[in-house]
Every structure is written in C-alpha cells, then in structure tokens.
Amino acid sequence: MEDKVVEIIEKHRKDDAKLLAILHDVQDKFGYIPEDAIKIIARELKMKKGEIYDTASFYSFFRFKPEGRHEVLVCDCIVCHIKGAEDIIKRLEDEFKVTMGETTKDGKYTFKMVEGLGHCEESPVMMVDGKLYGNLTPDRAVEILRRCEQ
Amino acid sequence: MILLNDAQNIEDYLENGGFKALRRALEIEQDEIIREVESAGLVGRGGAAFPTGLKMKFVKNEKNTPKYVIANADEGEPGTFKDRALMEKNPYQILEGMIISAYAVGAKKGFFYVRYEYRDIAENIRKKVKELRRLGILGENIYGSKFSFDIEVVLGAGAYICGEATALMESIEGKRGYPRIKPPHSTQRGLWGKPTLTNNVETLANIPVIINMGGEKYHKLGKEGCSGPQLFSISGFVKKPGIYEYILGEKTIGEVIELAGGVDGNFKGVMLGGGASGYILNKDYLDMPLCFSDAKKRGVALGTGDIIVFNESVRIWDVLHNIARFFENESCGQCFPCRYGTKRMREIIEKIVNGKGTSEDIKKLNATARAMKIASLCPLGKSAMTAYESAMKNFHDDLMEVIK
Amino acid sequence: MNIIINGEKIEAKQGKSILQVAKEKGIDIPALCNLIEEKPIGSCGLCVVKIKKGSKTYYSRACTTKIDEGMEIETHSPEIEDTRKTILEMIAEEHKEIRGEAKELFLKYGIELKGDDKKAIPKLVENPFISFNPEACISCFRCIQACSLIKENHVLVRENRGMNTRIVAGINERLKDAGCAFCGACVDACPTGALMDLTARVEKEMKKITSICPYCGVGCAIDYYVSNNEIVYAKGSLRGVNKGDDCIKGRYGWQFVNSEERLKKPLIKRNGKFEEVTWDEALDFVASRLREIKEKYGADSIAGLSSAKCTNEENYIFQKFMRMVIGTNNVDHCARLCHASTVVGLFKVLGSGAMTNSLNDLENDAELYFVIGSNTTHAHPVIGTMIKRAVKRRGARLIVADPRDIELSEYADVHIKQRPGTDVALINGMMHIIISQGLEDKEFIENRTEGFEKLREIVKKYTPEYVEKITGVPKEEIIKAAVLYATHRSAIIYAMGITQHTSGTANVASLANLALLTGNVGKRGTGVNPLRGQNNVQGAGDMGALPNLLPGYAKLKTEKARKIEKTWGGKIPDNEGLTVVEMMHAASKGMIKGMYIMGENPAVSDPNQKHVIKSLKNLEFLVVQDLFMSETAQLADVVLPAASSLEKEGTFTNTERRVQLLHRVVEPVGDTKPDWWIIQEIAKRMGADWNYKCPQDIFEEIRNVVAQYHGITYERLENAGLQWPCPEENHEGTEILHENMFPTINGLAKFTPYEYEAPAEVPDEEYPFVLTTGRTYEHFHTGTLTRKIDGFNKLIPGAFAEIHPEDAEKLGISDGDCIEVESRRGKIKVSAKIGGIKKGVIFIPFHFAESAANILTNDALDPEAKIPELKVAAVKLKKCQ
Ligand SMILES: Cc1cc2nc3c(=O)[nH]c(=O)nc-3n(C[C@H](O)[C@H](O)[C@H](O)COP(=O)(O)O)c2cc1C
Ligand code: SF4
Ligand code: SF4
Ligand code: SF4
Ligand code: FES
Ligand code: FES
C-alpha cells in the first residue's frame, strides 16, 4: 500500500490541483479509498488526515469501503425521471434483490441512483463502469447487465 | 454552424481555420481583445449570463499575480448536455478560446474542470492538451510569442455545487466544494486568493469566433438584448431530442420544439433554463423568443439554455418532487436555510404527492421558499424554489387541485 | 463611517462587520454559527439583515458583511424575523435535545423542539473526557472553527454533505486516534450542548474561582467551576497569560484532587508498615528525629529537597528551614534535573538565568521561532498552540531541531534531526555560517557585548561539512536554518532537550551566543527562552531552594548574604550544599543520614534509579511530604499528607517570570495541610520562633529579601500577575529583559563559546542505540498526579519506546511488541511504538514507575551545573523472551 500510494502522490506532486487527482487514482487502484491511504497522503502533503477526509467525503463518487466489481449508475434526474427511470429502478431492484446504494450479494454490482448523467437526449439512461446505455426500457436494462455477466 | 462544428482531430480543426484567432490575438494588445469581446456583447453561457468582456476586464486590471483562468465543464444542471456535445465535437475551439482569454487577462495557468460523469471526455481533453503542448500551442512561448500558458485538467468527483465558480475553486484547491462568501469576487480573489477568470466552456468557444469575425460583426448576430449563437439542449417529450444551435433571438420556444420534431404526445408545458433551477412554463410562453431580454421581460431566464418538454403524462407535483430531491441531495450543506430547507421542501412535497397535502403545507412551502431566498448563502439555495414558484404561477389550478 | 441601523444614525469604524457594530450598539441579532468575528463562516443565516445602499435593496448576513458608507440597515423587519423563525422551525423539526445558548434562542422565538430522528453516533464519542450528543448537534461548525482556527489542531472535521453533514474526528475515528489534544476548545464553542465535558452537569449554585494550573511552567490561569466544594469542570481563563487557551492537563488534570488514593492522614512507619497518626504525633516525631540526627552527625548530614510544585512561599520557608533551623545549605529541588544548566549558562552569557522574553511579545512579534530540544506542543501545549497559530495565521517562520518527528516539525520550514548530544556543534556551525556570510549584527556586537573575537576563533573550525559529520544533519539544512535565523526577528525556545546533558551549560551558553551574534536579545519577539517544566521551577530558584544560592540568587558569603542574615536573625552556613544527585551519592556512602523531601519523587524522576532507591533506603530517617503515596514516599519513615495547589493560597512564578496568585478552589481534603504550615510546625518544634499566619505573611518577607520581587504585593497580583524584576510598587513589571543593559558588572553580555564534546556515553558495539527520554502530552512528570486520573490512563496506559521503522525491522520488532531495553545500569520492558524518530535513537517517556526510563539513564553530570545527562544514554534492545 505504502509504495503504491507514494507512487501516485509523486505522479501528481507537480500538479497544482493535486488532492482530487490523487484520490481518484487511489480509488482506481484499490477500488476505494482506504484509511491507510488517507494517512499516507496526509503525511506526504503535510496535511491532517481529517482535512483530507473532510474533502473526500463531500464528493458522492468517493467511497471508503470496498464495493461491487461493477458500478451501475442509474439516472433518476428530471428528464430520465419523466421518461420512466422509476420503472427501470424498480425492475433492477427486483431483479437483483437490492435497493439503490447497495451491492449485490455476490459482490458483482453496486447500484447507485445518480442526479443527472448529461445524456438527456437518450433518457432514460444508465452507466455501467463508465459506459453509457441510453433509451432504456426495464427489460433492456436487465438484459444489458445480464449480458455483461457472461 | 458556428460552435457545434465537427472537428474532433487537430487536422480537421486546423483545416477549418483553427488557431487563426489565437495567432491573431497574440499580435494585438490585451485590451484590444477585451474590447472586441465587449463590443460583441457576449454574455456567459454557464447560466448567469454575465457580460464576458467585463469579467475579463476586471481580471486584467488586477495587479495581483499570478492570475488564473478556469474552463467550467462541470455541467451539472439536469436537462443540460450541450457542454458535453461541444467538448465531444469541437474541443479545440474551447481550448483556443481559453488560451486567448488567458492571454487577454495575463494568466499563465489554466484549469479545465470536468465533472466526474464525463470522465472519458476529461481524458480526451487531457490528450489534446498534451498534443497542443507538443505543437507549441500550449506551454512556453506559444507560437513563438512571449506568452506562455499551460492547462491542467481537473476531474470532479460528483457534486453539482462544484459548478458554482467559487465552489469549483475550492474543489481545485483540494477542499470540499463550499461556495465562498462574496465579496470578495473571484475576479479579484479567486483560486488561491489570486485574480481568476471563470468561464463556461461554451462561452469560451465563442471567443475565437469573435476574434475572427470582429466584435461589431458578431454583435449583429441576433437582436437587441442578445447576440451570437447558443446551444440549446432539447429533451423530454419531443420526437428528436438533442443539441440545437441557433442564433439568439431568432427562434421562439415553440419553433424550437417544432424543429426538434415536435411534441411526443400532447403538449403540457416546458421547463426552461435548467432542469433544477429553471422555470416551469405553460403554453403562454411558446411564443417567447429565445433571447435574454425577452426572457427577462417575462420574469424568467434562459439559464443554461435547455428546454425540457412535458406531455400530458407528466405530473407537475411529481416533477417538483424530483427537483426537491435533487436539491436535497446536492445542497452542499454549508448554510442552514438551504441544508434544512431543501429537506423540508422535499418532505412537504412528498406528502402532497402522496395525496395528503393541506393548505397548511402550501403555507409552509411558501415560508420555506421565502426564507431560503432571503437567507441562503449561494444561488443554489436561492434558486431551489424557482421551479415551485413558477409552477405555482403557471399551473396554479392544476397544483391546488390535490390540496385539501 | 456613517451608517443607519433601524433608523438611527451611527458612526462606526471601517472594517467592522454589521454584526460587530450592532452588538456594540446593543442590538441583538441572533448569530448561531459565529465564533471568530474576523473570520465569519456565514452558516446559520440567522443574522441576515436588510440593506439599502444607493438604489439597491438586498438581504445579507450581518456577520459577513462589512459596513459601508451610507448603508441603511434594518435588523428586525417582519420578513427578516419570519425568516429567522422559519430557519429555527426547520432546525426544531430535526432536533430535540438542544441545550445552552441555542436553546435560549428557541425559547425567545417560541419554538418547540420536536425532532425525533435517531442519528448515528460518530466514533468520536469514545473518549474519556468529552461527551457528544448527535441529537443536539446542528452542524454549525463552531467546534470545527475552534479546533482548526483557534487551536490549529484540525481534529474535528465534517463528513458528507447537505443534510448528512456531520461532525467527526479525523477519518471518523476516536478522538485520541484523530490526534485530539483534549483542550476542550470545541466544548467551549458549542452552542447546543452537543459537546460537553463529561464531568459537567447543571448545578444551581456554581462559583467560578480562578487559579493557576497545577502543571507546567506556562502557568495558565484556569477558571474552576465549583459547587459544594467540588470542582465540576474547568477551562482556560481569559484573564491569564493563556488568554482562554488550556490543554488537557489544565482542563481535566484537576481530577486528581478527589482521587481515592489521596493521602489523608499523617503516617509513621512502624515495623515496616505505615500507621495513621495525629498531626501532633507525626510532627513531634519528625522534629525529634531530625534533632537527634543533627546532634549525632552534624547539620550537614541532613539534606532537603524542596519542590518546584510548591509555592514561592513554601520554597522560601523550606530553604530557610534547612539553612536556619537545620543549619545546612544542603537544599535543592528538581530543577537541578531540568534547568540548572539554564541558570548557569544564561548567567554566564547574559548575567541572568531567566527567560528573556514573554509569551505576549513572542506571540505577536517574533518573525521566526527556533525551537530546539522542546516538544512544545506536548510539554508546554499552550505555547505550542501559540507557535502553530503564529505560523498559520501570520506566516511566522519556524525552525525545529529535534531528533524526533514532533508535532511542530509538521509546521516547520526546516526540521533538523541532530544526533542527541551534538547541539553545541550544531549551534557553533550555525554561527560559523552566519559569520562567514557576514550576517552577524555588527552594531549590536560592538555596543553591547564582549568576547566576540574568542567566539569567532572557536567557531572557525565548525564548517558545515564538519558539523554535518558530527550531527548527521545535511549541511544544506544547517545553512538554511542559519540564514533564516539570522535574517529574521528570531526567538529561541528550548527546554530539556538542551539542558539535560553533560554539555547542558555549553548548550545553553551557545544558544545565548547565537542570539547575541545576531542581535536577537533585548527586543520584542526575540531572546533566549527556556521553557520551565514544573509550574514553579522559576519560583523555586528565585526563592533560593539551591545549595549555592540564596533567595534572589544572592551568593553565599557576600554582602547580599549578610543582608539576608540580618532579616533572618542568624547565621547562614558558609559552605555550599549538595545538589540532588550529589545528595544521593552522599546518602549511599552514608554521609547523608536524614532527608526531608517535599513534593518530589526522586525514586522515579532521577537518573540511575536503582542507585537512587538504594541511597534512599540507606538513610536513617526519611520524611516525605506529598499528595500521594509516591514511590519515594513508600521508602519514608514518616509521610505527611499535603494539600494540593488547588487547595491553598500562595504564589507561583511561571516560565516568563510572572508571579501569579493562587486562589483556594476547594477546601483541603481529609486532614491534609498546606506545605508551609507543615514546615513551620516542624520548625517551631525544633525551637524556631516563627509565626507566619498565612502565605501572605511569608510573601511580605520575600519582598524584603528578594530585590526582583520588591514591588510585588498580593493586591497587585489580583490581575494576571506581575513579571519580575519589579523593583517598586509603582513598577509595571518587566516584559523583556536586557533592553538597554545586561545585569553584568560592565553592563555588557559576554560571548562564552564552548567546544563540542561528545556525550558521556556514546553508542558502541555492545550498546548501539541512543536513548533519549521525555514527556508525553497526557502525563506529567512522574505521573504522581496524572496517573491518578482514569481518563489519562485510558489515553496512555503505559510506557513505550519509540523506534525508527528500519531499526525495528532489523530487530524483527513490530508495533506493540514487548521489548527489553538495557543500559549499563539496568533494564526495563516496554512496548514498541514505531514512529518518526531518527535512526539509531529511541525515546522513552519517564512517567511510568513500573518501567521507569530512569533505570536506564546515566547520572553523569554537567561539570558546571551538575545536571545529569538524562537525554543521552547508550542502550541495547531486543524483543522480550
Ligand atoms: C449551483 C450552481 C451551479 C452551476 N453550475 C455551473 C456549471 O455546471 N457550468 C457552468 O459553466 N456554470 C455553472 N454555474 C455558473 C458559474 O457559477 C459561473 O457563473 C460560470 O461558470 C461563469 O461562466 P460564464 O460567465 O461563461 O457563464 C453554476 C452556478 C450555480 C450557482
Ligand atoms: S457539536 Fe456543537 S459546535 Fe459542533 S457543529 Fe454540532 S452544534 Fe455546532
Ligand atoms: S478537544 Fe481540542 S483538539 Fe480535541 S477535538 Fe476539541 S478542540 Fe479539537
Ligand atoms: S499549558 Fe501548562 S499551565 Fe497551561 S493548562 Fe497546560 S499544563 Fe497547565
Ligand atoms: S436527466 Fe438523466 S441524463 Fe439528463
Ligand atoms: S451568524 Fe451570520 S450566518 Fe450564522
């Protein structure tokens, strides 16, 4: 952990806007931001660990516990909402036996409801590991996830 | 088209006259560039419609250095996706506008702040920045001039409020995205306390256009009270949702909806200027030209230039509930009126949506709205009730029908 | 500036906020989140007002809006009051258990608290001193402002956002793990009672009594809140040098007062067991035994240890007792172990052994702090906070020289990690650089000093390369530090890391040389500033509890001594007495037969502990006066129960020479008596004609004898004390020494250069590590007080040895392992703590009798000051079997 985190910090040492960049890279590396990583960052950047947590915990995409292997972001913001996002959410929750915000039992998916993915021309939409799927129907949403299971 | 040209690689961009404006700009005085922008009448496309030239002048006139410029690509407003389309299709024009602005105000360093949801775009911009460095269009002595400038791409991490200029600065500085108390304004004391110019990416894409065509000529695009092209995000119940580029003032709301294929179903209303902080309007507004002054006359605003079309399936209380939840989730929580107010607003509307609303609840909503407007620290809290208030005006009977 | 508030024309100073101006005018604007007026955070929104300026009318926060010419302000218009009410209603819907200041606001607006959410409990509640009630917390961030902006601790932070924003410590940790200082600033800031001292409770009748903290030499004034002769809670007083600051010891350290373990009755040991006796019996017995020993072996067979924890009055009559009633100069106190070298070293160079400057000018005027051999944030926390604040708030520079990563090193421009015991080389090296770069203050040297040529001669060979070799510090850092120091208004701050060496006097003198060289003496924000360990180290010395000096530092057999004899009405013995360590040696050899120890615990605090215990056991008669059955008291023949400083009156003199008055906070527990009373009773029984009725009587005599105290009276001390020298009753006291003249014969300071000499014991093949000792933040000295307090023990339950990660790895030691540390004098077991210390060095705190660091330490002495080398010993370590 020590070496990996220090390596990430060194990569951003010269950046002016380092903290977010470091946190992103740490999260990419470990799947979440471990407490020990925060301590190392604090030491290296001469900050207090609490100051880093104060910043990091503000943002909705930073997480501090391990999550499922795939991240599914379902948009329920206004456009997606009026175009049926609720139905999709309900269907996914039934199908995968979770509520939004949770991880499936097998640790495969973590589902999150999000406020706007910026693809409203294709509403309703969801994003799986950064890839966008638009013009969803409940069936299609399930199908997409089942397909990527194989 | 002036903005939404397809120039995804540098060859295409250069072929279409890319970076001509920058080279020209480097040959003229900083003040002259600012004068052109001022005479063009360009105002910000990020929502607040502030005169861009004036902002540049403020930063330019500050003695304190170093100065910074920021390209705001946080695009968090629901129903708005034009910045994404622009960055995908025509990224160099934004960067060119950013470099020219930096030169005009005397900044050596810029930050390009992209929301987390557009991570792939951020990656792409990062690549383009490297490419421009290689070509001598960024970095030391751009095009052999004395001007040096570089850009750092910053990826957000999920917070609508970080689109607000000063919250964005806090975020770049590695802090939580709390909007700052103003004054001092960020043109005077922005990033790390230094003078900072913040512009929406679409605004920036207009700068090369103005330099190429001249401020006077640009100003003639459009009409009294608005000039230049603007990107409109059209979504909801229209047959061809997407981004449409029009000269401001040329088209009315109704015409634009028709150009987007017309309503899918029966028209009920639109949400204009932002899917959270915008206005909920009825058919009376369909003939309103899309122009800042016309909007102002009617007590509304173009905001981020989006139009969400509602058909008969849309229930207004449900929309308001969704918006309230959005604000509850996205309130930064720095100030009490907004932190507690957005929660209360969502709770009351939830009660109404569940058919249990009373006239007491409406009174309470109104009091909350007023308190939030008077005492919220930043525009998020102040505008959180805009949708409710405009809906109450334009769909009054509809809304009161379910109230006991 | 002219403004109008609620129709009334008001003139106010530019730069003030509307809230400040309104407050001054008695207009009551509710303000829940405002803590630091100059740094408003504008969170609660309750202070919002309506402003008309020119053609514009708008609403704005009174706390964040500066007044501006011509503003018309309305503070209580109907829509504003409605807004306030709505905000309060919204809070009330979420919370129910709000108390304190906020509660009053709800009452005023007639709003009932009715929230019923169960809120998650953050980990910070797991701590022994501070309670947290999440139902009451409104996330106003006042606690965070206090913790970060006032204290620079940055322990409390925010978690999440929006309605989920809540207060946590560190990464949602327990307070201690997050680095909490337990200063309680957050508690004082909290308007809702969400944060409270665990001991606090609501009492109908509560008295506030201000006295002086019983612990370190900073001498903070503490407000004690007392009900029914019991302390309920305490906090730093705004009236003291600490200006409202405090630390864990000042805030919670009073809890020993009611400890079960307090001694309550005099005890005499019979057949190896202590028996409770009456005061008369005990006092008669002590007097007769001392008389017997004196008659049989002579007065010089008796020695006394006075105490830096006792008042000036008590120290004064203790040494008077030893000198006049017993008839010996064998009197010393524990400052021998901490600052004897300061007194000697500074005396040689500057003509006075005291801290040259004051907290006030150091706080406001120093441009640079050179902190050497002082873990300030732990040992003198309030000064530590002051330095952190100066660095963060006004950009003061900081050089730290310490082999350990201490908290201050995080704030430092340069952190020098010198090998323990190489300070003279380091400082000579800095002087070499300063002279070779021409950065010395030539005018100051010319006009105010002598002996510069000799200094120049001696430091010549201390080139950066040479010094790097000795100290192990990269020469670039030494150069950077030297240049920074020489080019700023710089203050040297040091403590036991400098003094507790065989080269202690040389270290101190070298620091003073450095200050002279750059003219950093006699001005605000400069100087040579020793931080005194115990609360009355300065006073005990001033009072002459020293074997070679009389009250007021009068030398034996001089004119001054004769004058004192006149007041005392008798003859002071001529020959110098023995120092602490010498007493122990003499006792082991049977030359000292009887000892009288007041409030000290040499069995734990002194070096080479085994030897000390053997010596004490070798005595024919030992009487110990203490609050608790200390390790030393256990060896005594008679134990006399003393009242603590919270239970008596008198004066303490803090590290900056400030004489401060104690007020009795609670009545003495059990049958305990103030030390001065006990001494006088014994003296009377030995034939002395003493009749002091109260400490003030003694102080009046002190004023007569000690010139520096002449102008000080109890009445004058009521307000924040006075700094000596204070020669006349209309004299304001002296903030800064040596402004125009040094108290030497010719008024000049004297450069006194020293060569570097290696410590008495250097690591070798058999004992390859250097052991250095010191204190922790939570405990104090030998723990006699702090280890009686549960909370403190929970925070730091036992001894540990801090060790560099690579050293640990080589020895196969991991964090928390039991390790055995052995020196030529003994061995102890402690748990390992892997941390930021220099390679080859280990650190062990000395509070813990059961694994006493001083079993290991060396009692080799500084030749001039006779201070033992507690900071360097050669040791070896291994994992416990
Ligand atoms: C809550 C809030 C969110 C905002 N989000 C954005 C945004 O995502 N993108 C943007 O360009 N401006 C946003 N703004 C506006 C910015 O504060 C700022 O006015 C803008 O970046 C200035 O650029 P312009 O003058 O080019 O419009 C937001 C403002 C508020 C109050
Ligand atoms: S604990 Fe007290 S001071 Fe801190 S945020 Fe909560 S209410 Fe405010
Ligand atoms: S006690 Fe002091 S250090 Fe600890 S959290 Fe409170 S303010 Fe911060
Ligand atoms: S700094 Fe010293 S005097 Fe002040 S409260 Fe702490 S221990 Fe007591
Ligand atoms: S509302 Fe879901 S992508 Fe825009
Ligand atoms: S006191 Fe001004 S906002 Fe709280």
Image (cartoon, grey):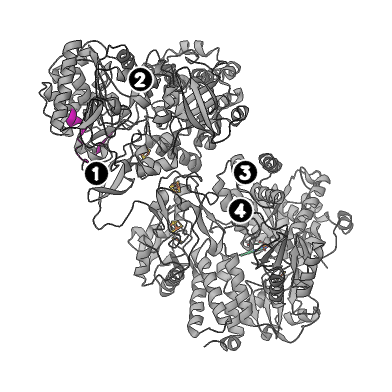
Q: Foreground mark, 3 or 2?
A: 2
- Measure the C-alpha gap from mark 4 to mark 1: 47 Å
Same chain, labels 4 and 1: no
Quadrant of the rendered image holding ligand 2: bottom left
**Looking at the picture, does residue C679 appear above or below residue C111?**
above
Labels 3 and 4 within one chain = yes
Q: Which mark is residue A56?
A: 4
Picture mark count: 4
Q: Main secondary structure of the magenta part?
A: loop
Where does the image place residue C637, in percent across and percent down from the top left?
A: 24, 24
Residue C325 appearing in the image: no
Badges 1 and 3, same chain: no
Which disc number belongs to residue C612?
2
Identify the amino acid type marked 4: Ala
Is the C-beta separation of discs 4 and 2 under 8 Å?
Answer: no
Q: CA distance from mark 1 to mark 3?
A: 47 Å
Q: Which residue is tagged 1? A: C665
For the record, the magenta segment spans: C659-678
Residue at disc 1, secondary structure: loop
Is B20 left or right of C138, judged from the image as shown?
A: right
